[in-house]
């Protein structure tokens, strides 16, 4: 869906290129997370996709079209863009902000209004309360939601999101991430998502692209990035806890030994937990193994430290 | 520019920010200062009476001109100001008392002077003139300061704010229209001018307004160009700044020859009045003069829009002119307009220079008055200028309020 072919960008006056011979292919309906240290060229890469920045060399394709063959405004109106630092228009209400692209596309008023309401509900904000609010009346988290709603407004197949959940507290961030996953399950957009935060990348990304000094160091599914970091840099970047992060990606269901039995058992762990939570629970209880219960509280299986270890030792496909 | 960026100036309902903190008992500072000034003003000459229009006058103290009753009448409004300055001076009631009393005092002092002038003049002779003395002007200044502060405390857009603002000018206009002030030297000059006064005001307004309109269109355009095309900005700024370095009179002088040449070359221009003398060099000079403030504020206003906001606009697919029109200009509007306001003030003042190229306006009244040492004529012209400048300022503030997007406006509260 999106293809970058050895794209480079050297800003005037900079001592080295911000993006250097960078290639990447994003499949339709996937979330690719660009991650790397500050200044490694993530935003630059993203902006080249919607031509806010023109590359010095290389090509970018959207579907089968070279982005340079499209009229730049048309291209951008077809790509949702949620910007680093929100960038809502301060003189416009939430309704007007969300309606930015639909207005540019010439939608009529009632349709824009309906769409704005629908999107506010989608991002978990009450339209009655927020439709006529202005950006300075919103909390950081609310503003970020509106930023996401604005990016989705004209239902573009492609979304570019530059640290859309950057400036919020961990709890709000967690909720925004959950909602993002929820929305993405329904909408199946092709998303390029920039973040600094490896946990966010692991959680949201179908694939993770790790960048360093304008180049691509590793491009893979989260489990493999965690299990087989390409080099020292990636290993360090994903952090010393990468084994635990890997555990948080695996569900308990695939690891536990199914059983059936009584209800209302304690101690136990819920079947929807991930391996990391299960391990934590096992350590807490201190017995080496633990009963697994379904939502109704009835026994559905049992999991031991050995099971978790065995899972961990299997190669990641 | 610092003034132009102070959004508090637009705040309806704003309370004076110069509020003393700390002590609970605090008299109103401006009120007390004004009262001190008025006390001093009563010691200064109240009037001067001369044998003729241009003769040196003899100063008269307030007790030479008025009896005790008259002095009591002069003092009455200021007693109200005193009460309003010390009794719960922060309440709206007190603000209204101070503002209303100060405005009334202006009218009262004029009426008292008007009434005293007739007898005073008769004692001296048939061509005698009665001029207002320094004391009256000082008291007027004190009243003006109080009115300004009261109208801010009451709120610029509110009914009491308007009443306080308009009470003095309307009161004086009515008194003058009813002939109560006819014996004052200023009014004598006014009547002597006969048919010439109001057309002069009209010309002054016409020159100023057309220069401001042209300068606004041109200046905003140049400001946008300077902002959008970095390479153009240095030349644009050096040209518009260059006009400012030439003294206004010299600029008009420089334009006389080329305008004359133009009108010779193109008779069509001559037919609409373009020539070395007359309105053409004045309007042109005023326009060039006004450009800098407008170009500079347009540029600064556009530059003050956060880069993310601009990038959001571009990233959503706005064309560059849509970004300017829908995002940057609305956000820059308050700053741009305060540039226009500054330029208007300058323009109204500079338009007096039209006197030197026979263009009319209020300039000739002032300059001829100065040349003939006819002080009342100078004062008449100056008052008209001040009134015009204040009116323009008020109009511009109103316009600025209207062009500011609703949300940004509320930010200013
Ligand atoms: N407009 C610009 N002009 C010149 N240099 C720039 C410009 N934008 C970015 N750079 C430089 O290019 C490099 C990459 O910047 P970029 O914004 O792509 O980084 P990033 O990975 O998004 O960083 P962050 O995580 O801090 O947002 C940095 O060294 C930055 O200083
Ligand atoms: Mg960035």
Image: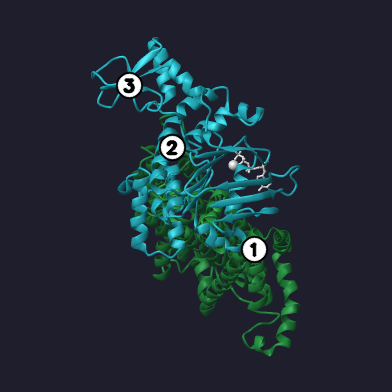
Discs 2, 3 touching: Cβ within 8 Å: no
Q: Position of residue A13 (x, y in %)?
A: 75, 47
- Name the residue: 75% across, 78% down: B258
Both marks 3 and 1 on one chain: no
Q: Which mark is residue B396?
A: none
Q: Give the residue number, with chain letter if any, for mark 3.
A: A301
Q: Position of residue B292 (x, y in %)?
A: 65, 61
- Name the residue: 40% across, 20% down: A278
User: From the Cβ of disc 2, is ligand 1 less than 8 Å away?
Assistant: no
Q: Nearer the viewer, residue A138 or B100?
A: A138
Q: Position of residue B349 (x, y in %)?
A: 60, 64
Q: Nearer the viewer, residue A126 or A202?
A: A202
Q: Give the residue number, with chain letter if any, for mark 2.
A: A177
Q: Nearer the viewer, residue A314 or B215?
A: A314
Dot 1: element: helix
Q: Give the residue number, with chain letter if any, for mark 1.
A: B225
């Amino acid at each position: 869906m999106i293809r970058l072919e050895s794209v480079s960008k050297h800003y005037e006056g900079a001592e080295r290129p911000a993006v250097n011979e960078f290639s990447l292919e994003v499949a339709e309906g996937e979330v690719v997370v660009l991650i790397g240290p500050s200044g490694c060229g993530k935003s630059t890469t993203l902006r080249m996709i919607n031509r806010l920045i023109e590359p010095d060399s290389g090509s970018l394709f959207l579907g089968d079209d070279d982005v340079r063959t499209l009229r730049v405004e048309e291209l951008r109106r077809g790509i949702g863009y949620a910007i680093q630092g929100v960038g809502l228009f301060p003189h416009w209400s939430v309704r007007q902000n969300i309606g930015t692209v639909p207005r540019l596309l010439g939608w009529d008023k009632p349709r824009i209004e309906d769409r704005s309401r629908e999107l506010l509900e989608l991002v978990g904000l009450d339209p009655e309360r927020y439709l006529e609010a202005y950006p300075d009346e919103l909390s950081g988290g609310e503003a970020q939601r509106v930023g996401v709603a604005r990016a989705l407004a004209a239902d573009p197949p492609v979304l570019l999101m530059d640290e859309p959940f950057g400036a919020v507290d961990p709890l709000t961030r967690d909720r925004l991430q959950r909602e993002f996953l929820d929305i993405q399950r329904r909408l199946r957009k092709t998303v390029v998502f920039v973040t600094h935060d490896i946990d966010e990348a692991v959680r949201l990304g179908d694939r993770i692209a790790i960048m360093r000094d304008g180049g691509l160091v590793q491009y893979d599914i989260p489990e493999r990035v965690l299990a087989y970091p390409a080099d020292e840099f990636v290993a360090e970047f994903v952090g010393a806890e990468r084994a635990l992060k890997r555990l948080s990606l695996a569900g308990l269901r695939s690891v536990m030994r199914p059983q059936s039995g009584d209800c209302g058992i304690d101690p136990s762990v819920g079947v929807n937990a991930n391996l990391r939570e299960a391990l934590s629970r096992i350590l807490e209880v201190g017995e080496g193994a633990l009963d697994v219960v379904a939502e109704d509280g009835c026994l559905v299986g049992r999991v031991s430290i050995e099971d978790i270890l065995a899972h961990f030792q299997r190669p990641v496909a | 520019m610092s003034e132009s960026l102070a959004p508090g100036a637009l705040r309806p309902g704003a309370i004076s920010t110069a509020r003393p903190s700390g002590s609970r008992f605090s008299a109103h500072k401006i009120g007390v200062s004004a009262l001190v000034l008025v006390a001093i003003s009563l010691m200064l000459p109240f009037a001067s009476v001369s044998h003729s229009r241009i003769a040196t006058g003899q100063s008269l103290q307030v007790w030479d001109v008025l009896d005790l009753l008259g002095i009591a009448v002069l003092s009455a409004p200021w007693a109200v100001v005193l009460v309003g300055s010390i009794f719960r001076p922060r309440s709206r009631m007190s603000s209204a008392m101070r503002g209303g009393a100060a405005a009334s005092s202006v009218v009262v002092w004029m009426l008292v002077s008007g009434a005293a002038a007739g007898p005073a003049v008769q004692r001296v002779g048939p061509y005698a003139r009665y001029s207002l003395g320094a004391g009256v002007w000082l008291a007027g200044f004190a009243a003006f300061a109080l009115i300004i502060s009261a109208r801010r405390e009451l709120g610029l857009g509110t009914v009491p704010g308007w009443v306080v603002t308009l009470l003095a000018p309307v009161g004086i206009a009515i008194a003058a229209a009813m002939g109560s002030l006819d014996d004052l030297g200023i009014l004598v000059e006014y009547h002597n001018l006969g048919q010439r006064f109001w057309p002069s005001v009209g010309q002054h307004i016409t020159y100023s307004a057309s220069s401001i309109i042209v300068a606004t269109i041109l200046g905003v355009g140049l400001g946008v160009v300077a902002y959008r095309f970095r390479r153009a900005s240095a030349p644009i700024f050096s040209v518009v700044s260059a006009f400012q370095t030439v003294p206004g009179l010299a600029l008009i002088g420089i334009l006389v020859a080329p305008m004359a040449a133009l009108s010779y070359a193109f008779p069509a221009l001559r037919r609409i009045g373009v020539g070395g003398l007359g309105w053409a060099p004045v309007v042109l000079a005023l326009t060039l003069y006004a450009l800098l403030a407008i170009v500079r504020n347009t540029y600064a206003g556009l530059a003050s829009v956060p880069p993310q906001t601009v990038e959001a606009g571009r990233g959503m697919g706005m064309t560059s002119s849509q970004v300017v029109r829908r995002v940057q200009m609305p956000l820059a509007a308050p700053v741009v307009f305060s540039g226009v306001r500054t330029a208007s003030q300058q323009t109204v003042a500079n338009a007096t220079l039209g006197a030197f190229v026979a263009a009319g306006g209020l300039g000739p009244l002032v300059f001829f008055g100065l040349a003939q040492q006819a002080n009342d004529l100078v004062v008449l012209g100056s008052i008209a200028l001040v009134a015009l400048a204040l009116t323009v300022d008020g109009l511009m503030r109103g316009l600025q309020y209207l062009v500011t997007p609703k949300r940004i406006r509320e930010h200013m509260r």
